[in-house]
Amino acid sequence: MASGGARARSGPPADLNSYRQRRNEDGWIKLPERVDRRRTPNWPLKPGLTDRERELWRQFWKMGQSIVWESQHQQVTLAIYVRLLVSIENENFDVPASRLTQMRIMAEDLGVNLSGMARHKWRYASTEELQKKSEASAPAAEAKPRKSTAQQIADLFPSAGDDGAG
């Protein structure tokens, strides 16, 4: 029986600021810091939301990852994650280790934590990119219209037919 070898999620997470990561940037999706939504998706689970679940639901749907969740129809998975998080909070984290493990796995699957973001090849803009963007857009901040959620999704996932040769 063979032993050792690469395993899923083994080794340190990728350093997004390293030379190699900058050189091999292909495949990484740069998420917006915040998604301005007019309304969040409907809560898909029964029974309805508690106040704390509503608060978290709205917070999660403002995160950059929400663009991907929406495009991949992850509303139910996120709702289960929110409900599990609230149930763990209500028990003051005095819960079996298996529930905490499930919570960690769901966070990685949804890309809520850093290891999950690295696994999905999602990242936010680096500090240098944010600084350049801030300096460049300072005078023209008022002229730029706000993009819709659908437009933000389209910007993240350009269609295969768009090769720029048109």
Image (spheres, rainbow, N blue to C red):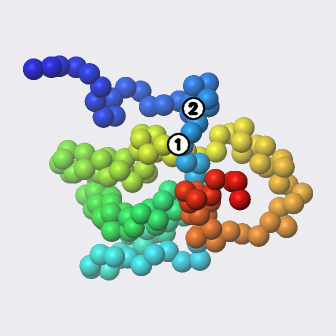
Asked whether, in this view, residue 109 is left or right of residue 126, the answer is: left
Toward the left, the furthest residue is: 1
Instruction: Evaluate whether residue 86 shows in this view.
Output: no
Asked whether, in this view, residue 79 is left or right of residue 91, the answer is: right
Picture coordinates of residue 46 (x, y %)? 26, 79
Q: Quadrant of the N terminus?
A: top left
Amino acid type of the residue tagged 2 in the rendering: Asn
At 62% across and 68% down in the image, what residue appears? 151
At 54% across and 43% down in the image, what residue appears? 28
Picture coordinates of residue 33 (x, y %)? 61, 54
As helix, strand or loop, the secondary structure at mark 2 comes to loop
At 64% across and 45% down in the image, what residue appears? 125
| Crowdedness near tag 2: few (<14), some (14–19) or many (≥20) residues, C-alpha within 10 Å | few
Q: 58 above or below 125?
A: below
Q: 104 above or below 84?
A: above
Picture coordinates of residue 63 (x, y %)? 53, 59
Asked whether, in this view, residue 70 is left or right of residue 6, the answer is: right
Total labels: the figure holds 2
Question: Along the line of sight, which residue is nearer the eye, 158 or 90?
Answer: 158
- Residue 142 found in image quarter: bottom right
Toward the right, the furthest residue is: 139
Instruction: Evaluate whether residue 151 shows in this view.
Output: yes
Q: 53 above or below 22?
A: below
Amino acid type of the residue tagged 1 in the rendering: Gly
Question: Along the line of sight, which residue is nearer the eye, 144 or 93?
Answer: 144
Q: Which residue is mark 2?
A: 24
The mark found on residue 27 in the picture is 1
At 26% across and 21% down in the image, what residue appears? 5
Asked whether, in this view, residue 9 is left or right of residue 91, the answer is: right
Whether pointer 2 and pointer 1 mark residues with C-beta atoms closer than 8 Å, the reply is: yes
What separation in Å lies between label 2 and label 1 (alpha carbons)? 8 Å
Q: 166 above or below 43?
A: above
